Image: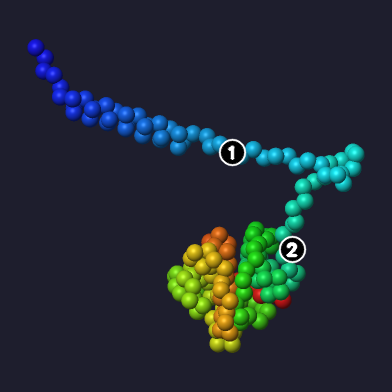
């Protein structure tokens, strides 16, 4: 006569088998195609002509400032509060707005002199992707972003040289620029 297995052994075996099947299906699903959102085609606007359709209007990013140098560089416009990451061909690969500190660098040519670890900024906010490029009025001038992605608080009369970026822009700048990368500051 054959020995009977206890019920706990059956339950354990079935549970292990079900877990293995779920894991196998999850691995298959992870390697499969990903669904994508459908992109709606723009409808012609009332101002579109009878023979044409209106092109979707998305504002073009601001042009790279003239006389900002040549080759691979970071361009910072004081007036536009904007940064451009320019590749070796002289084409802007990315541009974004920034929050300048209360102390600004003079227009001119600089380079990244130091990349810093996450730290507390002089405004008391935890920052990362810190890239120093000059000193103005005794204050270090650097690009950085808040660890929590927030915009900087009001300065309350402090002398601050941090040029604060959005979190994703800080990561892009950090990937783009290394010590020695040229920085052009323009009006």
> Is label 2 in a helix, a strand or a loop?
loop
Residue 97, picture quadrant: bottom right
Name the secondary structure under disc 1: loop
User: Viewer-proximal residue, 41 or 138?
Assistant: 41
Q: Is residue 43 above or below residue 171?
A: above
Disc number at residue 36?
1
Q: Between residues 71 and 132, which one lies in front from this camera angle? A: 132
Marks 1 and 2 sit apart, C-alpha to C-alpha, by: 32 Å
Residue 110 coordinates in the image, percent (x, y): 61, 77
Q: Is residue 46 left or right of residue 62?
A: right
Q: In percent of the image, x 57 and y 64: which residue is there?
A: 166
Residue extending furthest bottom?
137
- Mark 1 or 2 closer to N-term? 1
What crowding class fits label 2: few (fewer than 14 Cα within 10 Å), some (14-19), or many (20 or more)? few
- In which quarter of the view is residue 26 placed? top left
Task: From the image, state whether disc 1 or disc 2 is nearer to you.
Answer: 1
Check if mark 1's residue and mark 2's residue have beta carbons within 8 Å: no
- In the image as oriented, which residue stretches furthest toward the left? 1
In the image, residue 139 lies at what x, y percent? 55, 84
- x and y, in percent, of residue 53 in the image: 84, 41
90 and 99: which is toward the camera = 99
**Quadrant (top left, top right, bottom left, bottom right) of the N terminus:** top left
List the single residue furthest toward the front: 7
The structure residue drawn at horizontal position 40% and vertical position 31%, both measured from the top left corner, is 25
Residue 102: x and y, percent? 61, 80
The answer, for residue 148, to whether it is visible in the render is yes
At 59% from the left and 87% from the top, the residue drawn is 137
Q: Which residue is mark 2?
A: 63
Vertical order, 74 against 34 (above or below): below
Q: Is residue 22 above or below residue 116?
A: above
């Amino acid at each position: 006569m054959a020995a009977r297995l206890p019920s706990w052994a059956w339950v354990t075996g079935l549970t292990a088998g079900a877990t293995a099947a779920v894991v196998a299906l999850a691995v298959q699903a992870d390697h499969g195609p990903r669904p994508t959102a459908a992109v709606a085609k723009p409808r012609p606007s009332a101002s579109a002509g009878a023979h044409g359709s209106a092109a979707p209007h998305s504002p073009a990013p601001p042009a790279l400032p003239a006389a900002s140098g040549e080759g691979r560089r970071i361009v910072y416009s004081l007036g536009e509060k904007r940064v451009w990451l320019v590749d070796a061909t002289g084409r802007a690969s990315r541009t974004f707005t920034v929050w300048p500190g209360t102390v600004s660098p003079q227009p001119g040519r600089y380079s990244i002199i130091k990349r810093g670890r996450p730290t507390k900024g002089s405004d008391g906010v935890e920052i990362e992707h810190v890239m120093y490029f000059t000193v103005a009025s005794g204050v270090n001038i650097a690009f950085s972003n808040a660890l929590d992605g927030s915009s900087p608080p009001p300065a309350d009369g402090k002398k601050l040289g941090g040029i604060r970026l959005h979190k994703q822009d800080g990561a892009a700048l950090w990937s783009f620029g290394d010590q020695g990368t040229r920085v052009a500051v323009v009006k």
